[in-house]
Image (cartoon, helix red, strand yellow):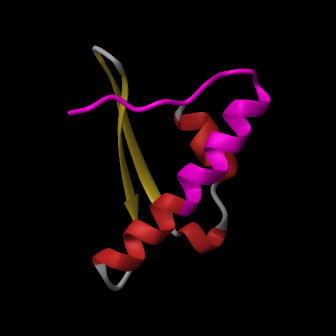
């Protein structure tokens, strides 16, 4: 997953670091991005994750979410 995210990261995402770990229902991700505000950081992370979801779909996988 980390490799897929790095492969989809562009300079405008300002990605610094990814922390990923397996959890009972999938993968928990923490993305560290450079940003002046939390809102900008959230927008950048959302953009990166959206790009990655498209790539995952091309590989034949399905992305879903589970309630916390």
Residue in the image at 52% along x and 69% along y: 14
Q: Tell me: residue 37, above or below residue 47.
A: below
Task: Residue 37: give x, y in percent of width and height.
Answer: 31, 82
Task: Residue 23: give x, y in percent of width and height.
Answer: 29, 20
Question: Would you identify the image quadrant in which residue 68 lies?
Answer: top left
Left or right of residue 29, residue 14 in this image: right
Left or right of residue 11, residue 65 in this image: left
Q: Give the farthest residue toward the left.
A: 68
Task: Residue 10: give x, y in percent of width and height.
Answer: 67, 63
Magenta range: 47-68
Q: Give the farthest residue toward the bottom.
A: 36
Quadrant that contains the N terminus: top right
Residue in the image at 63% along x and 44% along y: 52
Q: Tell me: residue 45, above or below residue 38.
A: above
Residue in the image at 41% along x and 78% along y: 40
Question: Would you identify the image quadrant in which residue 41 lies?
Answer: bottom left
């Amino acid at each position: 997953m980390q490799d897929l995210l790095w492969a989809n990261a562009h300079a405008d995402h300002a990605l610094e670091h990814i922390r990923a770990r397996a959890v009972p229902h999938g993968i928990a991700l923490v993305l560290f991005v450079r940003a002046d505000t939390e809102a900008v950081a959230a927008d950048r992370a959302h953009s990166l994750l959206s790009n990655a979801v498209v790539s995952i779909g091309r590989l034949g996988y399905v992305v879903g979410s589970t309630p916390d």
